[in-house]
Amino acid sequence: MRVAALYLGAALAEIGGCFAFWAWLRLGQSALWVLPGMVALVAFALLLTRVEAVSAGRVFAAYGGVYIVASLAWAAAVEGLRPDGWDVAGAALCLVGAALIIAAPR
């Protein structure tokens, strides 16, 4: 449960931080959006380092699946883009892969 919370927090921080830059550079928002964006990206890095694992690469690889699901949720909640069946199926597949990387007996 702790790992899931860390991954979810990291995903929200990364997506929020990147979206702040997107808002500034692509949506014409104020450059001041960069400040909370940078704070969010630092929070992302800090949260991801709290996941217990032998290898940073495994943590990052497994995070990829969580990031995909969180990105689609962000698109729906913030941008009003409803994921289609292909999005959902692909995200589910990635999440299963992430679970295999993290939870596999070694």
Image (cartoon, rainbow, N blue to C red):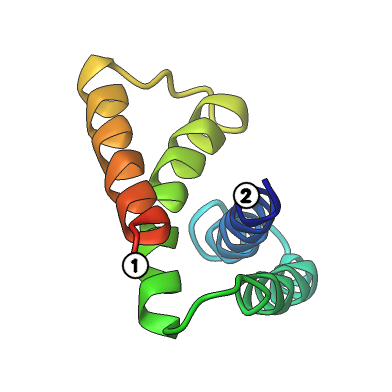
Q: Earlier in the sequence, mark 2 or mark 1?
A: 2
Task: Say which residue label 2 marks.
Answer: 8
Provide residue 37's location: percent of width, then percent of height.
70, 68
Left or right relative to 22: residue 69:
left
In percent of the image, x 74 and y 72: which residue is there? 43
14, above or below 100, in the image = below
Q: Nearer the viewer, residue 16 or 9?
A: 9
Badge 1 amino acid:
Ala
Secondary-structure class at tag 2: helix
Q: Quadrant where the N terminus lies?
A: top right
Residue 93, disc: none
Secondary-structure class at tag 1: helix
76, above or below 42, in the image = above
Left or right relative to 80: residue 13:
right
Q: Are marks 2 and 1 in contact (CB under 8 Å)?
A: no
Are there few (<14), some (14-19), or many (20+) residues within 10 Å of tag 1? some
Left or right relative to 91: residue 32:
right
In percent of the image, x 59 and y 56: which residue is there? 7
In percent of the image, x 62 and y 56: which residue is there? 3
Provide residue 73's location: percent of width, then percent of height.
52, 32
Quadrant location of residue 59? bottom left
Provide residue 15's location: percent of width, then percent of height.
57, 55
Badge 2 amino acid:
Leu
In percent of the image, x 29 and y 17: which residue is there? 84
Task: Say which residue label 1 marks.
Answer: 61
Q: In the image as oriented, which residue stretches furthest toward the front? A: 106
Provide residue 67's location: percent of width, then percent of height.
45, 52
Are there few (<14), some (14-19), or many (20+) residues within 10 Å of tag 2? many
